[in-house]
Image (spheres, rainbow, N blue to C red):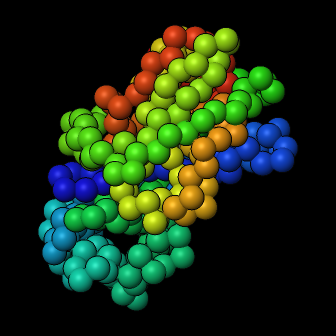
Amino acid sequence: MRSLLPHALLLLSLTCTAAHADPRQDWDGFRAAMIQQASGPTGMYAIQDATVIPAGGAAHLPAAQKPAQTRWAKDAGGKTEVRVSYRGGQALVEGPGLAAVDLLKAKNQQQALPNGLIVRATVYEDSLKAWLYNPALVATRYKGLSFFPYDPKGVIEATFTRKDKPVGLSHLDSRNHTGLMYWIGDVQLPLQGKTYTLRAFNKGQDWNKLDHLLMFVTDKTSKKTSYGGGRVLEAHFPPGQPPKTLALNLNTMYSFLCAHSDYYNCPINLTTFVPVELSYGEKYPPGAK
């Protein structure tokens, strides 16, 4: 999430990764977190708009717009309008009926507005993404989530070979922006009598800080019973201490967030195709074509 416009695969803070003592419990926690991520007041189906604010810039919500029609506009606007500015490392939201608040220090990096909408901020290296949520949208948009049944065969021991010097890879995302992710190593994943190599990625490159890896996967269920753009499998570990053996729970694979909202930026050329059916984790979104 870096030099040009951010790729913004907004990763979920899920318990979906590191195979606890009870992988079935991991799966239960994963589904609960996914449902909350989708259906909450600042969930995927409540997103009304989003905009990228460069360092030193601002955006505002025009005062004349009704809540359901409100969208971000460029620049700071006037004193009668809610505005977010990104300067000096602060994402300051202010406007009528609001005390000035730095969204980056606010609880959950968000602020409720007097008209019932909610603003939230996600900071990148050189810009800020300002999100606008309308909780009323969830009732009409959210149709539930679908998951493959839990399968203990999806709990697999894999091996990880780290790259001592991560390799930066530029990629095109689903919103035609250029992003950068770091290839931090390879995962050797045994499946159905064969072993497949999956590239592992992270947004950062400093091994002293890295505490997880991401694998972007398509397989023979893609575009059929799972999202065609790809799914994500995570593995977490203590900062700077990636293990050589990973206990992966494929039951916790989740769709690229673009399966649920066009406002996300999902990498489209970093996936690894695995030529088997991975009938684990999140299925194709309900109502998707």
On the picture, is 139 further left or further right than 61?
A: right
| Above or below, 278 relative to 188 | above
Number of numbered discs visible in the structure rendering: 0
Q: Relative to 126, does residue 178 appear above or below in the rendering?
A: above
- Nearer to me, 209 or 63: 209
In this rendering, the answer to whether 251 lies above or below 19 is above
Q: Quadrant of residue 59?
A: bottom left
Which residue in the rendered view is the most extreme toward the bottom? Answer: 99
Q: Residue 263, image x and y in percent?
A: 36, 44
Q: Is residue 272 visible?
A: yes
- x and y, in percent, of residue 32 in the image: 72, 46
Kindly identify the residue that appears in the image at 23 percent across and 41 percent down. 170
Looking at the image, which is closer to me, 30 or 96?
30
Q: Residue at x 61, y 61 (%)?
A: 238
Q: Is residue 66 left or right of residue 112?
A: left
Kindly tell me whether residue 259 is visible in this rendering. Answer: no
Q: Residue at x 41, y 76 (%)?
A: 104
Question: Is residue 91 found left or right of 134 in the rendered image?
Answer: left
Residue 163: quadrant of the picture = top left
Where does residue 203 sit, x and y in percent of width and height? 38, 52
Q: In the rendered image, which quarter contains the N terminus?
A: bottom left
54 to 88, vertically: above or below: above
Residue at 37% over, 57% down:
204
Q: Whole-percent x and y of residue 201? A: 42, 43
